[in-house]
Amino acid sequence: MLLQKLVLVAQLGAAVVLYVLLGLSVLSIGVIIERWWYFRRRRAKLVDLAEAIRRPLQAGDPAAAAAALKQSRSVEAEIVGEALGWQSGGPDAVEQILAKAVRQRRKSFESGLLFLGTLGNNAPFIGLFGTVLGIVTAFRELGATQAGSTAGMGNVMGGIAEALVATAIGILVALPAVIAYNIFQKKASDIEENAAALGNVVLAAMKGRHAGLGKGGSAPQVAASAEDSGPAAAALPDGARLATAEAEA
């Protein structure tokens, strides 16, 4: 009794699996198109973007660098633009905000990849499941066919052929999903690497400015010591100045 019910389920299941695969293929194509458009609109020329922020930062004008980043639609520009607002906290604060901004936006540029990866791994098994159900139905018809009936054997062979179509469709659905998953996964990794590279430009410019301020700060101290010596000392030759300094010591 139970076996007969399972056979009836198998008769319906083979067709249901084909419809499921068809629906998954439509969803997969939709996700692929959406992801392609997302990455296309947010493409970034890393060299041009780095040059656009390097010059203002070296000139001490972070507002101009932020304005240049706002002109770009790329995710990298959004990440670095958010980190620029934390320059007053020093390089460590900028590094922390860069890491936070990448994690915060990872959901946006990795959206849909889980679906594509899961579909690419499991669509062949769904098709194989449909094939098994179709073969069960075909053998049931074979058992009901009279021995030596040519028409009955033809129907059985046709049913097996139709069942194998489910496996083929499963593989056909999986291939584009796997290819798209690998491509978009690489693009997501490129976004993180590009954001890190632009962050290095910001950090290098900050450290360069701080080093320049440190060197500039030593010059006034030297000048002040020369001024404290008085105008008379400044007018003396070098040797006389040295002798006077030794005498004062």
Image (cartoon, helix red, strand yellow):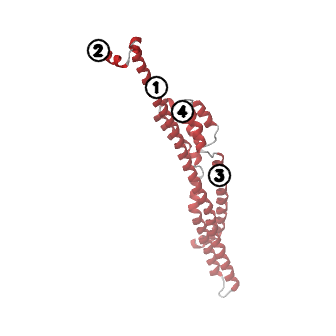
Quadrant of the snapshot with the C terminus: top left
Residue 247: image location, x then y, percent? 29, 14
Distance (Cα) linking label 1 and label 3: 50 Å
**Residue at numbered disc 3:** 36
Identify which residue, 73 or 232, lies in the foreground.
232
Query: Which residue is under mark 1?
Result: 216
Circle 3: residue type: Trp
* Residue at the image point whose x is 61% and y is 42% from the top: 48
Q: Residue at label 2?
A: 247
Q: Nearer the viewer, mark 4 or mark 1?
A: 1
Tell me the distance, in whole angstroms, between the alpha carbons under discs 4 and 3. Answer: 36 Å
Q: Is label 4 in a helix, a strand or a loop? A: helix
Residue 117, placed above or below residue 71: below
Residue at 33% of width from left, 19% of height from top? 242
The residue shown at (68%, 77%) is 158
Give how far across and how far down residue 128 sits, in percent.
59, 69
Using the rendered image of the protein, determine whether residue 81 is visible from the camera's viewpoint.
no
Q: Are marks 3 and 2 in contact (CB under 8 Å)?
A: no
Q: Between disc 4 and disc 2, whose residue precedes? A: 4
Badge 3 density bin: few <14, some 14–19, many ≥20, Cα 10 Å:
some
Tell me if residue 240 can be seen.
yes
- Amino acid bearing label 4: Gln
Mark positioned earlier in the residue sequence (4 or 3): 3
Quadrant holding the N terminus = bottom right
Are the two marked residues, 1 and 2, in contact with CB atoms closer than 8 angstroms?
no
Quadrant housing residue 230 = top left
Compared across the picture, whether 61 is left or right of 89 comes to right
Callouts 1 and 3 close, C-beta under 8 Å: no
